Image: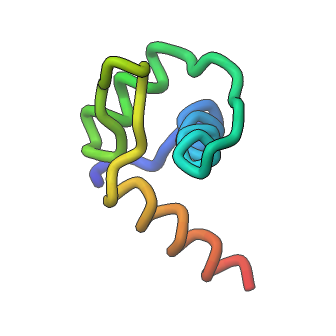
Amino acid sequence: MSAPLTEGQIRALRDLARKLGGEAVPFVNIADAQALVAHGLARRSRQGWDITPAGSALLARDAAGDD
């Protein structure tokens, strides 16, 4: 990934991860979601936006770095 994610993009990515886990999440900012798609971290689906394996891996790396 060439540029770091903004706070909004990180929040959207975390929300998409929670959505994948079955939680109800708020609407995702379209510009943030589109940026995540451009980075390969999310994709558009019939249900809205979904996190990709690359997006999940990025969050896992960030969580491991917080320890």
On screen, residue 58 above or below 20:
below
Viewer-closest of 28 and 18: 18
Q: Name the residue at 54% across, 35% down.
A: 9
What is the x, y in percent for residue 43? 30, 33
Left or right? Give the position of 62 relative to 57.
Answer: right
Position of the C terminus by quadrant? bottom right
Name which quarter of the figure residue 27 lies in.
Answer: top right
Left or right? Give the position of 10 relative to 50.
Answer: right
On screen, residue 42 above or below 46:
below
Viewer-closest of 38 and 56: 56
Q: Name the residue at 63% across, 39% down.
A: 15
Position of the N terminus by quadrant? bottom left
What is the x, y in percent for residue 5? 49, 44
Way the structure is coloured: rainbow
Q: Name the residue at 62% across, 80% down.
A: 65
Left or right? Give the position of 6 relative to 39.
Answer: right
Viewer-closest of 50 and 58: 50
Task: Single out the residue that lies furthest toward the bottom.
Answer: 67
Q: Name the residue at 45% across, 49% down.
A: 4
Name which quarter of the figure residue 12 lies in.
Answer: top right
What is the x, y in percent for residue 23? 69, 40
